Image (cartoon, rainbow, N blue to C red):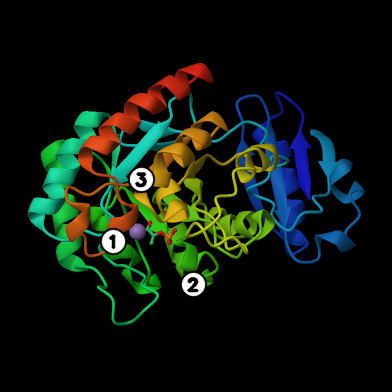
Amino acid sequence: MIVEMARGIGVEQVDGVVQRAKSLGFQVQLNLGTDKVVVAILGSNTGQVPSDTFAVLPGVESVTRIMKPYKLASREFKAEGSLVSVDGVEIGGKRVVIMAGPCAVESETQLMEAAKAVKESGASVLRGGAFKPRTSPFSFQGLEEKGLELLAQARKRFGIPVVTEVVDPHDVDIVAKSADILQVGTRNMQNFALLTNVGKSKRPVILKRGFSSTVTEWLTAADYLLAEGNNQVILCERGIRTFEDSVRFSLDISSIPVIKKFSHLPLIVDPSHAAGHYSLVPAIARAAVAAGADGLLIEVHPNPKEALVDGLQSLTLSDFARLMDELRAIAKSVGRYI
Ligand code: PEP
Ligand code: MN
């Protein structure tokens, strides 16, 4: 249930709603908007309580039931789009934020070369996996702690924030020491223990869409992060499984306007894992910016032929620089910039 308070009411009236909800055994989350306060009343049986229970309280303007399973990620709870701020980089504003770097951190030389080049081309966040969630147990699993150290070094050397994946709920603290943004991968979108810990960390987080998940399931997973009081959530569309096998995953371009309609959370797109092949990445990236994505997450490698992971879908440094020029033109044509 969503309780919208009237404009200009005081803290006592908000507190009245909060206390009423708590006395009924519900949890609450407040959205302190610029012109009004919205209170989300959360619990599995809010449906059994008549909305008048809250409508009669002083300062309440309206009470709405949210029939969708996700509440905190919904536009009903927060009408204006959310901004996530990472080291001065704002995601969800007019600027389309480009995050780029190798799939996995492989060595100091590889990471530093990639970091320098993507920054020079205009990327504002460096990506690189230290813990890799691999489909096969025999594939390279990442440099782990050593990878985190290298990311921290690159961040310091080039003054660029970093995003890296966390796969184990027990590793959230150690990954958060080196990462400005934590990434929850497609295979972990419904790892609820991981989501809860990442939520508790209060770190900016990229929540990738599960490759077999609906938009509703994805937004409901985002509620796990938001319910812990972490409102720095960025969604990432990275393609879903369909019958089509000419690409690695089918990028669901329509999820961009769908998410914008139903959620206030910023949304970026990963064209690399959808494409599966470097030749397809630029077109998908351009389409995502044209369709309203707030950013892109792109795999770039100084020497894709030698990459330990995802070389086939990685752009070379010069291909990335060229793509950035194309993206600037697309962004401009839709009233945004890079
Ligand atoms: C990644 O970004 O490195 C990754 C593993 O992506 P996904 O979880 O989307 O497969
Ligand atoms: Mn990858």
In the rendered structure, the answer to whether residue 161 lies left or right of residue 15 reads left
Q: Quadrant of residue 75?
A: top right
The circle drawn on residue 175 is 1
Between label 3 and label 1, give the one nearer the viewer.
Answer: 3
45 in relation to 87, above or below: below
Q: What residue does disc 2 label?
A: 193
- Calculate the distance from the C-alpha at mark 3 to the C-alpha at mark 1: 21 Å
Residue 298, numbered label: 3
Find the distance from the CA under tag 1 to the CA under tag 2.
16 Å
Q: CA distance from mark 3 to mark 2?
A: 27 Å
Residue 206 or residue 61, whichever sits in front: 206
- Residue 223, image quadrant: bottom right
Q: Does 48 sit left or right of 66 as displayed? A: right
- Give x and y (percent) for residue 289: 49, 32
Q: Residue at x 74, y 45 (%)?
A: 16
Can I make out residue 171 in this image?
A: yes
Q: Look at label 1 and name its amino acid.
A: Val
Asked whether, in this view, residue 174 is left or right of residue 254, the answer is left
Q: Is residue 57 visible?
A: no
User: Which corner quadrant of the figure contains ligand 2?
Assistant: bottom left
Tell me what residue is drawn at x 84 percent, y 36 percent: 62
Taking the view exactly as shown, the residue that stands out farthest to the bottom is 137
The residue type indicated by label 3 comes to Ile
On the image, the x and y values in percent for residue 301 come to 22, 49
Task: Kindly report which numbered mark, 3 or 2, lies closer to the viewer in this rendering.
Answer: 3
Q: Position of residue 278 (x, y in %)?
A: 35, 48
Q: Amino acid at mark 2?
A: Ala
Above or below, 205 relative to 197: above
